[in-house]
Image (cartoon, rainbow, N blue to C red):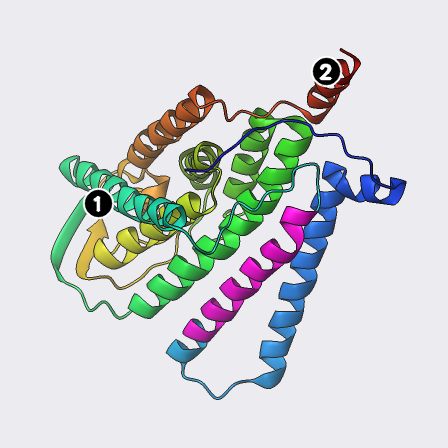
Amino acid sequence: MTAFNPRFIPRRFPVWRQVIDFPIVALLLSVLVFAIVFGGLAYLVTLLDLPLSEGGKMVFNAALGSALAIAIYKLVVPHVGTERRDYLPLAGIASVCWLMIGIVGAAVLMTAIVGLIALMGGYTVSGMGTAQSWLEIVFVAGIQAAVIEEIAFRGILFRYLEDLGGSWFALAATSALFGFAHIANDNATWFSSLAIAVEAGVMLGGAYMLSRSLWLPIGLHFGWNVTQGLVWDVPVSGHAVDGMVEAHPAGAALISGGAFGAEASVVALVLAGAVGVWLTVKAVRAGHVVRPWWVRRRMAREIVRA
């Protein structure tokens, strides 16, 4: 659906522009803009103290934060670095398809994970739930987390780390960082962070490599969080929620995931990790693996000399 040709394309730009386009500089510039905008947003929201209900604030913050993240990506990322491509198109059937494939695929995967955990005695349902957390799950854990985190981790970090060190370096680094980013969550442990790095980091990175569209990892992230929290009443990355059923972990924490939720289960580690490997293998077969910057540069010079 997305044309991809990971070549190094030499351009005749002024020295200052070549400095900005160097992957590390482009990465730092993008991260700086991202941090300044969201830091300013947090300060502004606190300063204004909008007269909204708790649910209204969730919807407002999710909508504004997601819109700003998209705007930062569109205005900055495709215009700096050695590759000038926009992997977040806002129109077109391909974008919708990748998004829906991600949402449905994650829903099926999470349902399979919870089902297997239940068969192994790690998940029980005691009745119907209140679904009181639906706004928080859909807008905060769903839309806000999916859009902002995927733009930050895959749209910015993965993009420029791949531009510098190649696909394997970017996949390993962003997976580790994504897992570490969840270490401060409620009920988190080093194992839960390791599990997220493997099952989510590799799966989302592999999805980005394969599709070369941020809409697939955004859809996966959204479907994963909403299905486990709203449908199956499983804590979302350690945060307890009220879902459509009343469910509880049972038995060994390695099977159930304990208080952190199914993401810290060996079941999720194996199943989602396998999906991540499968997506990555498909990306390799599709020719979507990027070589390190210095290798692409050397090959480009050899082609020019020939």
**Real-space Cα distance between discs 2 and 1?**
61 Å
Q: Return the residue at label 1.
A: 250
How many C-alpha atoms fall within 10 Å of the one at disc 2: few (<14), some, or many (≥20)? few
Task: Indicate the quadrant containing the N terminus: top left, top right, bottom left or bottom right.
Answer: top left
What kind of secondary structure does the magenta stretch mostly adopt? helix
Label annotation for residue 28: none
Which residue is rendered at x = 82% and y = 39% of the image? 18
Count of marks overlaid on the render: 2
Residue 286, above or below 206 = above
Q: Return the residue at label 2.
A: 303
Which residue is rendered at x = 59% and y = 42% of the image? 85
Circle 1 — which element?
Answer: loop
Q: Can you give x and y, in whole percent of width and height, for residue 97 in the image?
A: 33, 46
Task: Indicate the quadrant containing the C terminus: top left, top right, bottom left or bottom right.
Answer: top right
Q: Identify the mark nearer the N-term, 2 or 1.
A: 1
Identify which residue, 302 or 193, lies in the foreground.
Answer: 302
Residue 80, above or below 83 = below
Residue type, mark 2 in image:
Ile
Q: Can you give x and y, in whole percent of width and height, for residue 61 in the image?
A: 49, 71
Which residue is rendered at x = 63% and y = 26% of the image? 7
Residue 218, above or below 174 = below
